[in-house]
Image (cartoon, coloured by chain):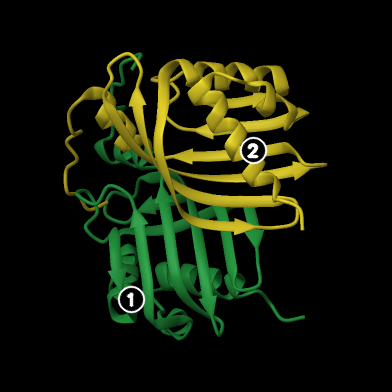
Chain colours: A yellow, B green
Amino acid sequence: MTEHSLWRLSRALHRAINERQLEEFEALIDEEVDWAIHGPIEMFPFLGARRGKAAVLEVVRRIAETVRIHRFDRESIMLGLDQAASMLRYSLTGLDSNKPIHLRLAHFAQFKDGRLRRFRVLVDALELAEQALGRPIHLPKIAW
Amino acid sequence: MTEHSLWRLSRALHRAINERQLEEFEALIDEEVDWAIHGPIEMFPFLGARRGKAAVLEVVRRIAETVRIHRFDRESIMLGLDQAASMLRYSLTGLDSNKPIHLRLAHFAQFKDGRLRRFRVLVDALELAEQALGRPIHLPKIAW
């Protein structure tokens, strides 16, 4: 039984971010990859939609310049033949501030021949924004 | 081939919210359901963790009092034997304000004997908060 593509991708991505070694990650990305991270793009310009390996490598380089992964817990997971989805809770460190950052995200990944073909990520952006601002965002208790 | 539990649950949940008919939904929920919606809980007290069918029915009643579902698009999906995960984009209407609300969420569902046993949802809370406040939350372009 071969290892699921998700585990290889996950290790390679974390290595790319923490050690700035992108070779393994690069080998696991389809040339025509369809990629989007839904998050506060005005705060982090490397979020958003990208198409193609070169654009995705640039995103990962920018993430690697911004944070280090301290730990992560996979809270939910589904593995399929050429697909995987999970919800993760990350503890990161901001490289400039040396501050801890906690965030939750969900991702959906589709693979083709073992390479990442489509990737969708949803980041809990409010939490991220509050930590970036260094203060809670006041939210009224409202009825719509 | 029987219908996946997700489709039954999805129809019943949407009917519970839009028509305040909870019977079908109630029949699809395990007594010991483990439920959490990660989102801006200070704004919407019905978000957060719940345990057991009664608590979950109360959450859905509160959602039904707050919004109506106008439409939704399932952007990503995975179906397993007793599991399902998807990412959805919702167009809602706030019942008090009659204002449109757009939000993206990801969910992971586990079923037992066709009933929902574990449910995890991540809501794009920043987007939700901005629409609730009626203005964008200013996010500095920062480096961490």
Judge left or right: residue A44 versus residue A131: right
For label 2, the SS is helix
Chain of the residue on which disc 2 is drawn: A
Q: Position of residue B23 (x, y in %)?
A: 43, 85
Residue B94 or B9: which is nearer the viewer?
B9
In the rendered image, the residue lying farthest to the right is A113
Residue drawn 28% across the image and 20% down it: A98
Residue B115 or A83: which is nearer the viewer?
A83
Residue drawn 32% across the image and 78% down it: B52
User: Depth-wise, is mark 1 or mark 2 nearer the camera?
Assistant: 2
For label 1, the SS is helix
- The residue identified by callout 1 is B57
Amino acid type assigned to the residue bearing label 1 in the image: Leu
Tell me which corner region of the image, top left, top right, bottom left or bottom right, holds residue A123: top left
Amino acid type assigned to the residue bearing label 2 in the image: Leu
State the CA–CA distance, disc 1 to disc 2: 39 Å
Q: Which mark is residue A73?
A: none
Judge left or right: residue A52 versus residue A7: right
Tell me which corner region of the image, top left, top right, bottom left or bottom right, holds residue A111: top right
Q: Position of residue B129 (x, y in %)?
A: 30, 39
Question: Quadrant where the C terminus of chain B lies?
Answer: top left
Residue drawn 39% across the image and 76% down it: B33
- The residue identified by callout 2 is A9
Q: Is residue B2 visible?
A: yes
Q: Is residue A14 above or below residue A57?
A: below
Question: Quadrant where the N terminus of chain B lies?
Answer: bottom right
Tag 1 and tag 2 share a subunit: no
Chain of the residue on which disc 1 is drawn: B
Judge left or right: residue A63 versus residue A135: right
